Image: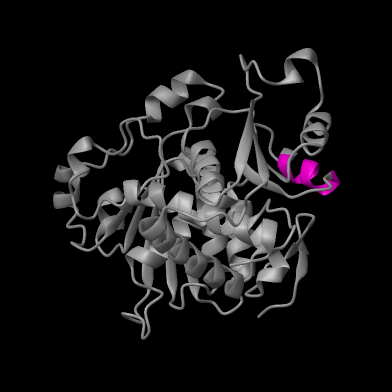
């Protein structure tokens, strides 16, 4: 395991296979988690799934309270964190800090730092989403209690990337012993790679050796929406064993020919300054049964999407056995249950 180093203000690789290393830690970047820590989290998430299906949950977080504070819209992230807390016997308070929200003093001019400091007087941890890149790490650095990032603008969305990684791990059977294959895993990241914080975090995660197999990251996007250089540089620098290869294309059919995973993202309309540019690009890639057939996409390829979708995946794909995006969403609750147990109790 590589030695912990400073990364964007946080200690890289500090969250390890030792559950105690997670206790009372904030989570603002995937770079905090070591390869062994990722394997622990995947194993713990699988245990949480078994727990929910057998018992519905337990009471390990009884009398613990989570605050969920969202300055941008959310359905899946907020509800899965809240449900995860309830499944483990805890409870939550929710603050809608976005435009038009009526439960936050932000409308009266209160600063983000003050809002979180006040909530931490009442709760044990905070889940925070904010539109400004770097805002969540900044708040967490001053916080006396754990802060978990639910996304900061076009920065990172670490818990989304973790549930995506768990889905890949689970769908491809990477946790089996022996592993099903030693062939490279080809992961196609498709769509708005410039603004999509989910793909930024996922690419960073996959730069570790957590999959146990070589990885080809194939970025497929319109030329103006390419993966940012700083993300590609991070992947190159973090992949010390050269197990990750990065490729770029704008041809979706050729990209899918040998794909293990297709990860589709919507165009982030809210991030575009020019609506005309958005309108000219919004239909660049539409995944439907016709395209999957024409592209000769593998019959065992896994199709993922962080949701919400607009029109980039047709509903005619929903009944395809390769469509994993609703299983992916359910996995979000299991992963967040595992995170809450590790961070609040130091228990996997």
Report whether 14 appears left or right of 168: right
**Secondary structure character of the magenta stretch overall:** helix
- 306 or 47, which is in the foreground? 47
Q: Is residue 138 magenta-colored?
A: yes
- Image location of residue 204, percent across then percent down: 57, 59
Report whether 62 appears left or right of 53: right
- 181 or 71, which is in the foreground? 71
Quadrant of the image containing the N terminus? bottom right
- Image location of residue 279, percent across then percent down: 40, 23
Residue at x-position 75% and y-position 72%: 4
- Image location of residue 309, percent across then percent down: 36, 34
Instruction: Tell me if residue 57 comes above or below residue 80 in the rendering.
Output: below
Report whether 44 appears left or right of 25: left
Quadrant of the image containing the C terminus? bottom right
> What are the residue bounds of the magenta stretch?
136-142
Residue at x-position 17% and y-position 57%: 296
Q: Quadrant of residue 256?
A: bottom left
Q: Is residue 139 magenta-colored?
A: yes
Residue at x-position 74% and y-position 38%: 135
- Image location of residue 246, percent across then percent down: 48, 63
- 70 or 161, which is in the foreground? 70
Whether residue 77 is visible, yes or no, is yes
Q: How is the image coloured?
A: one colour
Q: Quadrant of residue 232?
A: bottom right
Instruction: Tell me if residue 107 comes above or below residue 88 in the rendering.
Output: above
């Amino acid at each position: 395991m590589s030695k912990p180093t400073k990364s964007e203000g946080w200690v890289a690789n500090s969250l390890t296979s030792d559950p105690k290393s997670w206790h009372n830690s904030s989570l603002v970047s995937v770079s905090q988690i070591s390869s062994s820590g990722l394997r622990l989290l995947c194993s713990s998430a699988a245990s949480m799934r078994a727990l929910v299906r057998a018992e519905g949950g337990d009471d390990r977080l009884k009398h613990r309270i989570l605050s969920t504070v969202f300055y941008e819209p959310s359905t899946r992230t907020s509800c899965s964190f809240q449900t995860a807390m309830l499944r483990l016997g805890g409870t939550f308070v929710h603050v809608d800090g976005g435009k038009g929200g009526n439960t936050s003093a932000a409308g009266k001019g209160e600063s983000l730092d003050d809002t979180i400091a006040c909530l931490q007087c009442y709760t044990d941890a905070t889940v925070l989403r904010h539109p400004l890149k770097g805002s969540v790490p900044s708040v967490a650095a001053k916080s006396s209690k754990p802060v978990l990032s639910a996304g900061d603008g076009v920065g990172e969305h670490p818990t989304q990337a973790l549930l995506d990684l768990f889905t890949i791990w689970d769908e491809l059977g990477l946790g089996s012993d022996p592993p099903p294959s030693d062939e490279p895993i080809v992961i196609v990241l498709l769509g708005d790679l410039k603004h999509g914080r989910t793909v930024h975090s996922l690419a960073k995660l996959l730069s570790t050796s957590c999959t146990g197999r070589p990885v080809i990251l194939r970025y497929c996007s319109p030329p103006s929406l390419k993966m940012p250089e700083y993300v590609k540089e991070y992947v190159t620098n973090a992949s010390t064993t050269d197990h990750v290869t990065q490729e770029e294309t704008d041809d979706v059919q050729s990209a899918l020919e040998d794909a293990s995973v297709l990860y589709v993202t919507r165009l982030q309309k809210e991030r575009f300054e020019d609506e005309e540019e958005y309108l000219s690009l919004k239909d660049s890639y539409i995944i439907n049964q016709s395209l999957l057939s024409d592209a000769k996409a593998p019959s065992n390829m896994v199709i993922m999407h962080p949701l919400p979708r607009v029109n980039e995946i047709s509903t005619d794909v929903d009944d395809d056995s390769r469509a994993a995006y609703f299983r992916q969403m359910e996995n979000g609750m299991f992963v967040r249950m595992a995170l809450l147990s590790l961070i609040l109790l130091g228990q996997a």
